[in-house]
Amino acid sequence: MIKNKYSFIALIIFLFVGPFIFPNATITEMLIFGIVAISTNIMLGYTGMLSFGQALFFGTSAYISGLMLLGGFPLLLAIPVATLGSFIISLFVGYFCVKREGLYFICLTFAFNQMFYFIAYVWHEVTGGEDGLVGIERPAYIDSQLTFYIFTAIMFLFAVIALYKIVTSPLGLIFKLIRENASRAEAIGYNVRFYKLISFSIASTFTGLAGSLYVLIHRMVPIDQIHWLKSGDIIFMTLFGGVGSFLGPLIGVVGYIWLSDTFSIIWARWPLIMGVIFAIVVLYFRGGVSELLENLFKKYKSITRKNENEQNIKDKKLN
């Protein structure tokens, strides 16, 4: 949860300072996957549903947006249509997936992800197959790196505010109740499957929104963006940042993309390093990096407060 205004201020500062720290393409990618991770946390952290199918919605939306742009449709139409497409697909996929729980739910989301990946892989005439969908151009008004970043940042803020409104609403409380005790939620009258479907659709729709923006970064849709391994990356980012806080997954996205970019330059087998880091986080920092930073901040405040009290006592003795 965003506990106070300082978290929002820190987010705004990051949006302004980010382009001076990271390359434009990198910081833009961080914001796009920030939408994905924060929305995935609605399903994973708030409702307790682990899905290995989020790349399905990310990649499908990217294809829809890319195809519409190639067809001459305006971007401001392509984004909502692609997002709406993700929402409709999420209702269809989610209807079957929420009928099962735990491992079976995970397997179903994985199966649907691979099904859509295979369709994209063999439908070469539409998706470009293994070569991906190429030749996509940005509209003139966001053709520069700066204007595209500003546009992405605005979309990011819109998504974050909308998702925050959801988790702080009565609907968000129902999600938490289902996560803590689904049987009790059902006993007091809530249709657990229905609310799980809502949570699944919210996460998938905003993931689709991010996918419709991703196509503009490299002006193409790589086939790997709809592969289940991308779903694994999304889960990694979310858990790495921490599912216990609203903005925690964003920290995970920034850390994951920065570390992967850095290690990939140093060593060709960089995924081994990322695997070790992920194992350490899961074993020793169950709340992710955000919980670690929060604990360090609390310890710093405690030490500062203790030093101030000691100094006040000394001043009183001297007086």
Image (tube, grey):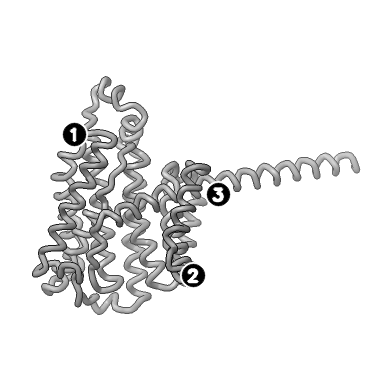
**Side (left or right) of 281 relative to 71:** right
Alpha-carbon span between mark 2 and mark 1: 45 Å
Residue 307 or 178: which is nearer the viewer? 178
Residue 296 or 99: which is nearer the viewer? 99
Indicate the quadrant where residue 33 lies: bottom left
Indicate the quadrant where residue 55 lies: bottom left
Q: Is residue 90 above or below residue 27?
A: above
**Side (left or right) of 74 relative to 237:** left
Alpha-carbon span between mark 3 and mark 2: 27 Å
Q: Position of residue 6 (x, y in %)?
A: 52, 51
Name the residue beneath numbered marker 3. Answer: 293
Whichever of callouts 3 and 2 sits on the residue coming sooner in the sequence is: 2
Task: Tell me, for residue 99, which label it has, or none.
Answer: 1
Q: Give the residue type that dot 2 points to.
A: Ile
Q: Residues within 10 Å of mark 3 (few under 14, many from 20)?
A: few
Q: Residues within 10 Å of mark 1 (few under 14, many from 20)?
A: some
Circles 3 and 2: CB atoms closer than 8 Å:
no
Q: Give the residue type that dot 1 points to.
A: Lys
* Residue drawn at the location 26% of the way across and 51% of the way down: 54
Task: Tell me, for residue 266, which label it has, or none.
Answer: 2
Whichever of callouts 2 and 1 sits on the residue coming sooner in the sequence is: 1
Q: Position of residue 47 (x, y in %)?
A: 32, 37
Quarter of the image for the N terminus: give it: top left
